[in-house]
Image (tube, rainbow, N blue to C red):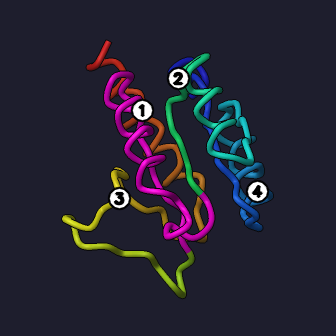
Amino acid sequence: MNQSCRYILVLDQDSDDLQMLEALQSRVRCPLVVTSSPDQAMAKMGQSPPSLLILTGNHQSWSASFVRRLRTMANACGIVIVGLTDVHAPSWLRQEDNPGLDGFLVKPLNCDILTSLLQSAWVRQTYCS
């Protein structure tokens, strides 16, 4: 997988999801970069666009202006943006209420789902190039 994966960027806002993502990352063999603030995430994306951006934590804590900036950058580079949510409290939104994300991942994740998502991200980036 690492030939088609730039890296996975995670914006981890005080969540307990990092261990799960690190364990999956070692199985899909795609580098994982973790940021702890929106400014860090934007700076890293500006240096080198990831294949996949995963936002952790409560989607209501992501400001609308931040998500718009992410979406603008993602559209230019073909980045897939997903939010990570819990199976017991999924953050499903109506399409018109979607805050600019491509979708939501529901925990617990497995390697097959992450691999499939990375392959889709690679196709999107290849098409946008």
Which quadrant is home to the C terminus?
Answer: top left
- Image spot of residue 47 (x, y percent): 61, 16
Q: Earlier in the sequence, mark 1 or mark 3?
A: 1
Tag in front: 3 or 2 = 3
Residue at left offset 45%, top offset 52%: 82
Magenta region? 56-85
Question: What amino acid is at disc 2?
Answer: Pro
Q: Earlier in the sequence, mark 3 or mark 2?
A: 2
Residue closest to the eye, 24 or 61: 61
Residue of label 2: 49
In this view, the residue farthest toward the left is 96
In this view, the residue farthest toward the right is 19
In this view, the residue farthest toward the top is 129
- Left or right: 119 with respect to 29? left
- Label 1 and label 2: CA atoms lie apart by 7 Å
Element under disc 2: loop
Residue 117 picture quarter? top left
- Label 1 and label 3: CA atoms lie apart by 15 Å
Residue of label 3: 99
Q: Earlier in the sequence, mark 1 or mark 2?
A: 2
- Label 4 and label 2: CA atoms lie apart by 20 Å
Question: What amino acid is at disc 4?
Answer: Leu
Tag in front: 3 or 4 = 3
- Image spot of residue 46 (x, y percent): 56, 21
Instruction: Reply yes or no: does residue 48 show up in magenta.
Output: no
Question: What amino acid is at disc 3?
Answer: Pro
Alpha-carbon neighbours of circle 1 within 10 Å: few (<14), some, or many (≥20)?
Answer: many
Residue of label 4: 18
Residue at left offset 51%, top offset 38%: 52
Residue of label 1: 79
